[in-house]
Amino acid sequence: MGPLFYRKEPDGGFVVGLRVLPKHANTRGSAHGGLLLTLLDVALGYRAAFSQDPPAALTTASVCADFAGAPKVGDWVEAHVDVQKVGSRLGFANAFLVVNGERLVRASAVFSRSGGALPGSASAEPGAPAGQ
């Protein structure tokens, strides 16, 4: 998978992105659906976890996705996430995968929250090695 990239947003959130490479493609030259679902799971989970202070320890319980199009090799794909709620037991978030301003995939996820904070996240940012 990857490499994955992220950029911080003015609201304190972040967007996760990926350039579709030939290794990511199916036989039709489009990004493989498994790659896109993995990107969504990573983006939804990190964004939901880091919406809390300290970041919440979350485990994916469910991810549902609808495909309205398919990114091609060479496309830059961004995952834009909206966290609905992270409560004491469950977290909920929605996302769109966007290519050139067009929404190609929409998804929603439910997360189970474990006790405590995300391990190694006291001062970590997404993508930073644990403990930094």
Image (cartoon, rainbow, N blue to C red):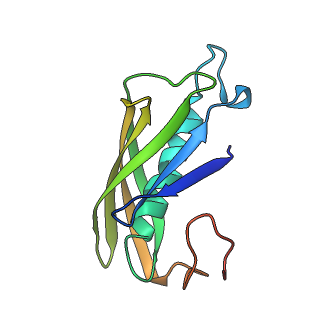
Relative image position of residue 27 (x, y in whole percent): 67, 15
Residue 86 in the image, given as x and y percentages of width and height = 31, 70
Q: Position of residue 8 (x, y in %)?
A: 47, 60
Report the residue that reaches farthest toward the left: 84
Q: Is residue 130 above or below residue 32?
A: below
Residue 110 position by quadrant = bottom left
Quarter of the figure that contains the C terminus: bottom right
Which residue is painted at 37% across and 70% down in the image? 51
* Left or right, residue 87 beside residue 26: left
Residue 82's quadrant in the figure?
Answer: bottom left
Q: Residue at x 52, y 78 (%)?
A: 118
Q: Nearer the viewer, residue 6 or 61?
A: 6
Residue depicted at 39% across the width and 38% down the height: 65
Residue plotted at (48% across, 83% down): 117
- Provide residue 22's location: percent of width, then percent of height: 72, 25
Instruction: In this rendered view, identify the residue nearer to me: 63 or 68.
Output: 68
